[in-house]
Image (cartoon, rainbow, N blue to C red):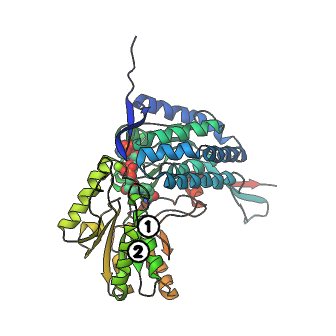
Amino acid sequence: MTTIVKEIRQQFNPACPSECVGQVELMSIEETKAALTVAQEAFEGWKNTSSVARGDILRMMAQLLEENIDIVAETASKEMGKTKNEMIGEVKRGASILRYFAQEGMRSTGEVLPSVSEAKLLYTKRVPLGVIVAITPWNFPVAIPLWKIAPALVYGNTVVWKPSIEVALTGKLLGELFEQAGLPKHVLQVVQGRGSTVGQVLVEAPEVKAITFTGSNGVGQNILNTVGHTKKKIQLELGGKNAAIILADADLDVAARLTVEGAMKQTGQRCTATSRVYIEEAVYEKALEKIIAEAKKIEVGVTMGPVSSKEQYTNILAAIDKAKAEGATLVVGGTATKGKEEGYFIDPTIFTDVNHTMSVACEEIFGPVLAVMKVKDYEEAIKLSNDTEFGLSASIYTTNIQKAFDFIERSEVGLVQVNDETGGAEPQAPFGGMKNSSTGAREQGQAAKEFFTTIKTVTINTR
Ligand code: NAP
Ligand code: MG
């Protein structure tokens, strides 16, 4: 008799790393391959289930998610540090993503086109792709997986999902809720394990028709290098270095509040976080003063959670030290939170006197760090805001309608905000970036259909 020893992973609370929150069994490479095989087998049945019925399951999942909001929010909050309130907001967003895509089951899946011959009926039909692999990060442990899984399922694909190991318990919970919602066996499978092992197997598997990935540029590039030469569809949502511009005519109270919210919400661990702000020199001192005041209102441990892991903690503190060493001036924070050293707490941090050769102006830090820069005018601001490899999101704060429209045209990003923070979009709107921030079709909204389906063009000679 052979005994199979399973690898167990324990999860710890970043607010109190000695507290074990729970544990999960990790899957072996063999189990991962088996999951792909059964996903392939389940495809035929799921594809032939009416899309209305598929949508009903998503609607049921939305209801279950709301009924279990407390446990899901609590689990994720304890696993990755986001405050419970932030997590409750995310779970609600998850339910609305599910309801939006549930309705897709009732919407048109093709169009009738005119033909050169009046005897011919010419139409298109959207069809599913097959087995989809979804690989997700830890920073939105509910919303990101759902905005991939929900459209993939409603359009008739089966899904093998690898959540980040950092949020494995939340991933397990979501998998169980989908089962309770009535999803047939093997239509969605949660593969628990590390990216470098099981993630790599999922990416390379020949039965996989498409890979939807959100995470870092390094891993995204690795996926491209591994399967870019194949016919697999690839969608990558990667990093950001999102800029905000505050013009002299802006409402400075609003601009300062939203800039700080954009930078510090979720402890700065959002791909759409504001990490640079350009302020027109005429209002520089005034705006900076208000930004500092807003940052000082944040209560670490109450309104702002810890960063998600020891790795994040070490990397963010190192990035802060590098900014200091490169000559940026620290005006707020800049250290681990005093008196909270038992957890991975970092103070909201703001640097001024930043120039574009400094790492704090160009590299994604993914923590509560904001770089402030003074600019002569709008022209200099737009030029500098576009001076980055990334292109996810950008904001302008202004009351000048011409400048707002000019910014909408010239800003090299996928998500443009006027008088709002650099955050993401609602479920019915496409989400994604330009330049090195994204590859492939946009996520969410009607754009999701582009990625998760392919088209059959049908011609019927009726005579
Ligand atoms: P990450 O380190 O790239 O990991 C993302 C996922 O990829 C995880 O599930 C990870 O597994 C897996 N993975 C790692 N190596 C892999 C490999 N060789 N093959 C297949 N999968 C692999 O990113 P993260 O640290 O979780 O998240 C932070 C990053 O995500 C930031 O750069 C942020 O900007 C980006 N992000 C982008 C968006 C967007 O929409 N543009 C949204 C949110 C976050 P394990 O970690 O479990 O081993
Ligand atoms: Mg990582």
In the picture, measured across the screen, residue 281 lies left or right of residue 178, that is left
Mark linked to residue 262? 1
Q: Is label 1 in a helix, a strand or a loop?
A: helix
What number of labels is visible?
2
Write the residue at 21% across / 63% down. Answer: 322
Q: Is residue 136 visible?
A: yes
Q: Which residue is mark 2?
A: 244
Q: Nearer the viewer, residue 89 or 357?
A: 89
Q: Residues within 10 Å of mark 2 (few under 14, many from 20)?
A: many
In the picture, measured across the screen, residue 172 lies left or right of residue 20, that is right
Kind of residue sitting beneath label 2: Ala
Kind of residue sitting beneath label 1: Gly
Q: Quadrant of residue 112?
A: bottom right
In the picture, measured across the screen, residue 155 lies left or right of residue 370, that is right
C-alpha distance separating marks 1 and 2: 9 Å
Residue 89 rendering spot, x and y as whole percentages = 54, 56
Mark linked to residue 67? none
Q: Quick check: marks 1 and 2 in contact, CB under 8 Å? A: yes
Residue 126 rendering spot, x and y as whole percentages = 64, 53
